[in-house]
Image (cartoon, rainbow, N blue to C red):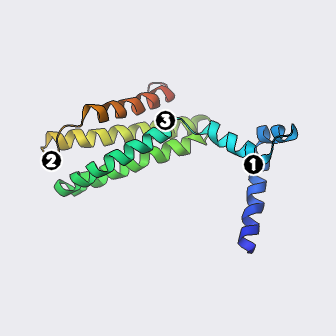
Amino acid sequence: MRACARLRAVLRFARSLDSSCARRVGRGESRARCAVQTREISMLRIYPILLDLVRTVGPLVRELERCDPDLARQCRRALCSAPLNVAEGSYSRGKNRAARYHTALGSLREVLACFEVAAALGYVSDIEPALKRCFDHVLGTLVRLTGGH
C-alpha cells in the first residue's frame, strides 16, 4: 500500500518537471493527456518497425545458434542493443541522444553483418531481399538521425 502511494508521488513529481506539459495543463489540458502526448512525440516512429524487425530476425538467430553458438550470442546481444538504444535516445537530449542513435546504428549493422558472415560460412542462406530492405530502411533512418557519420 505504501509503495503504491510512494510511486504515485514520484510520478506526480516527474510530471511536474516537464515545463511544456505544465504550460499545457495551465491552459486546461489534463496531466494524463499531456503525459501521453509527450510520450508519443518523443518516441521515434522507426521504433515499432525496429521491434518488428527483431521479431522477424529472432527465429533466424535461433537457427544460427545451431551452427555457431558464439556468433548467435553476439548477434542476439547486438539485436537487443539496437531498440534499447533507440528507446533510450528518444528520451535523451543533445549529444547523449546522438550517441544512443549512433550506438543503435552500429548494433543493427552488426546484426546484418552476423547474417552476412553466417551466409558466407554456409551456416544459413543469404538474407531475403525483403528483410534486407527492412534493415536498410531502419539503418537509413538512423544514419540520417546521426548526421551520416
Mark 1 → mark 3, Cα distance in angstroms: 25 Å
Q: Are marks 2 and 1 in contact (CB under 8 Å)?
A: no
| Foreground disc of the pair 2, 1 | 1
| Foreground disc of the pair 2, 3 | 3
Disc 2 residue type? Answer: Tyr
Q: Which quadrant of the structure image shows residue 125?
A: top left
The location of residue 112, given as percent across then percent down, is 30, 39
Categorize mark 1 by other alpha carbons within 10 Å: few (<14), some (14-19), many (20+).
few
The location of residue 7, given as percent across then percent down, is 72, 64
Q: Identify the element where label 2 is drawn.
A: loop
Q: Is residue 53 above or below residue 143?
A: below
Categorize mark 3 by other alpha carbons within 10 Å: few (<14), some (14-19), many (20+).
some
Question: Residue 123's mark?
Answer: 2
The location of residue 66, given as percent across then percent down, is 19, 57
Picture residue at 49% right of the left edge, 40% below the top: 47
Question: Residue 32's mark?
Answer: 1
Q: On the image, numbered disc 3 is attached to which residue?
A: 46
Mark 2 → mark 3, Cα distance in angstroms: 30 Å
Q: Which quadrant of the structure image shows residue 124?
A: top left
Q: Is residue 135 above or below residue 51?
A: above
- Considering the image in quadrants, where does the C terminus appear? top left
